Image: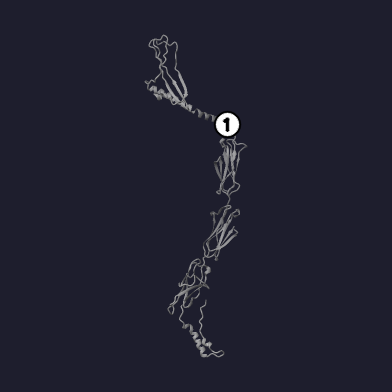
């Protein structure tokens, strides 16, 4: 916007008649007045535009200041300031502030800047033009990251390739490449240090090396290669049993072979017998695994295996294994079973007899220690001896022992006979009715009324 030209009112020259020659004196006077017109007006204010910083960086801020130089007279009217880049007005229009803050500048904002000051008297002044060049920062230190981290993604899942730059200003153009030869996948431009490229559902063909580039007009920066691995979950495994012969016998070694037809390694296999784990084995490079089992008679039943590579475990179908037991082994097993049954049945009886023997010995020791103790005894039937002046005396000793076995009570009653020799005719012997000791056993049902003899004493 050029400054306005000064016009001199020469109406007196227009009053001259057409065709008449102008008076030289009048022409000289008009020339003098024209030369003196601008200096004779009051001196206008001189303006100067400055920028802080003088070399702004792209993405940063910049402040413009419109400075007024010394004037020939004091201004009574308020002044408004306006700022321009080339022919485009900046900010919200003119204001009374001599400064304009630009929060963010880019390289496209480089150009010629100037300012304008005006008063209510329509006195306008322009500053000289100032050339401002916005400095850009080249892109630097570009890297490529993957989501999920580590570059391992499950087949059918989403893969995100993230291209990042440590620094760089302005609009940055990002590009993604596949393979060492650099098959371009996508290109996008945005004012950011980070950009993303997504593969919605990966397949086996997406297992490859990737890299990206970033460029903001100075020179492109390239990331390092990143390897992407596509992992597949294991399929349902198949279990096979390999025995030495057509039939499995105790002592044979059977191989349990488990294999999943598909799935990314490493794969861990577990072997089960009736849902009880027998062992496990891993295959770092894929394929199947085996487990050897030495058979016993108890190993008959259902077997299964499980495959797991971290993406979900799969269980095989159950396989039945029948173990053939020889006749001799069956007899041994039968005898063992019968023996166990007898021990279980006769156990209480053996304990009862052992307790009887122990009590009998205990009573014998008690009688030896306390000979004066005589248990009550029934009135004995004294036998008569022929031609005996003094009959023989019998002394009975009774003992009761009650042993409980289940709901039965065993009672043991015995007595001991002692003979005294007659005072007269010690050589005489009985002629009839001699009676030896007798042992009586009685078996009866246990009842609350039964009371042991020793307890009654």
Residue 288, position as x, y percentages in the image:
59, 45
Name above or below for residue 318 compared with residue 159.
Answer: above
Residue 86 in sight: no
Name above or below for residue 357 compared with residue 242.
Answer: above
Task: Give the quadrant of residue 19.
Answer: bottom right
Q: Residue furthest right?
A: 246
SS at circle 1: helix
The one nearer the camera, 357 or 27, is 27
The one nearer the camera, 106 or 412, is 412
**Residue linked to disc 1:** 330
Name above or below for residue 305 compared with residue 198.
Answer: above
State how the image is colored.
Answer: one colour
Name above or below for residue 141 compared with residue 303.
Answer: below
Task: Give the quadrant of residue 428.
Answer: top left
Image quarter (top left, top right, bottom left or bottom right) of the C terminus: top left
Q: Residue furthest top?
A: 387
The one nearer the camera, 123 or 87, is 123
Count of numbered marks: 1
Residue 393, position as x, y percentages in the image:
40, 14
The one nearer the camera, 160 or 245, is 160
Residue 194, position as x, y percentages in the image:
53, 60
Residue 442 in sight: yes
Residue 409, position as x, y percentages in the image:
46, 25
Mark 1 surroundings: few (<14), some (14-19) or many (≥20) residues within 10 A: few
Left or right of 13 in this view: 414: left
């Amino acid at each position: 916007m050029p400054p306005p030209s000064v016009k001199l009112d020469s109406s007196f020259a227009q009053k001259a008649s057409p065709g008449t020659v102008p008076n030289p004196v009048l022409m000289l006077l008009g020339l003098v007045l024209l030369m003196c017109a601008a200096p004779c007006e009051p001196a206008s204010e001189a303006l100067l535009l400055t920028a802080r910083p003088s070399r702004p960086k792209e993405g940063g801020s910049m402040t413009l200041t419109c400075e007024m130089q010394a004037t020939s007279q004091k201004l009574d009217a308020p002044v408004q300031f306006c700022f321009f880049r080339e022919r485009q007005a900046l900010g919200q229009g003119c204001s009374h502030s001599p400064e304009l803050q630009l929060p963010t500048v880019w390289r496209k904002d480089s150009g010629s800047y100037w300012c304008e000051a005006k008063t209510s008297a329509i006195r306008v002044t322009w500053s000289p033009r100032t050339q401002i060049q916005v400095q850009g920062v080249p892109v630097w230190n570009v890297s490529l990251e993957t989501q999920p981290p580590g570059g391992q993604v499950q087949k059918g899942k989403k893969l995100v390739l993230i291209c990042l730059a440590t620094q760089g200003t302005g609009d940055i153009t990002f590009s993604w490449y596949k393979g060492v030869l650099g098959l371009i996948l996508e290109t996008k431009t945005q004012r950011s240090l980070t950009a993303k490229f997504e593969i919605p559902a990966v397949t086996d063909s997406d297992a490859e090396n990737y890299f990206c580039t970033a460029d903001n007009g100075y020179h492109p920066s390239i990331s390092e290669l990143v390897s992407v691995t596509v992992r597949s979950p294991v399929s349902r495994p198949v279990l096979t049993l390999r025995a030495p012969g057509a039939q499995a016998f105790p002592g044979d070694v059977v191989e349990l072979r488990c294999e999943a037809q598909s799935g990314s390694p490493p794969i861990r296999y577990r072997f089960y017998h009736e849902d009880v784990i027998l062992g496990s084995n891993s295959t770092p490079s894929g394929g199947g695994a085996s487990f050897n089992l030495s058979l016993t008679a108890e190993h008959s039943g259902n077997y299964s295996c499980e495959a797991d590579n971290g993406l979900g475990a799969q269980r095989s179908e159950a396989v039945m294994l029948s173990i053939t037991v020889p006749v001799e082994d069956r007899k041994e097993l039968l005898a063992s079973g019968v023996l166990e049954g007898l021990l279980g049945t006769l156990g209480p009886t053996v304990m009862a007899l052992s307790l009887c023997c122990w009590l009998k010995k205990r009573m014998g020791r008690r009688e030896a220690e306390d000979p004066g103790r005589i248990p009550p005894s029934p009135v004995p039937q004294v036998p008569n001896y022929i031609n005996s002046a003094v009959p023989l005396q019998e002394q009975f000793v009774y003992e009761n022992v009650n042993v409980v076995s289940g709901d039965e009570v065993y009672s043991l009653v015995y007595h001991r006979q002692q003979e005294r020799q007659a005072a007269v005719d010690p050589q005489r012997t009985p002629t009839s009715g001699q009676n030896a000791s007798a042992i009586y056993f009685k078996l009866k049902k246990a009842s609350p009324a039964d009371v042991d003899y020793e307890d009654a004493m």
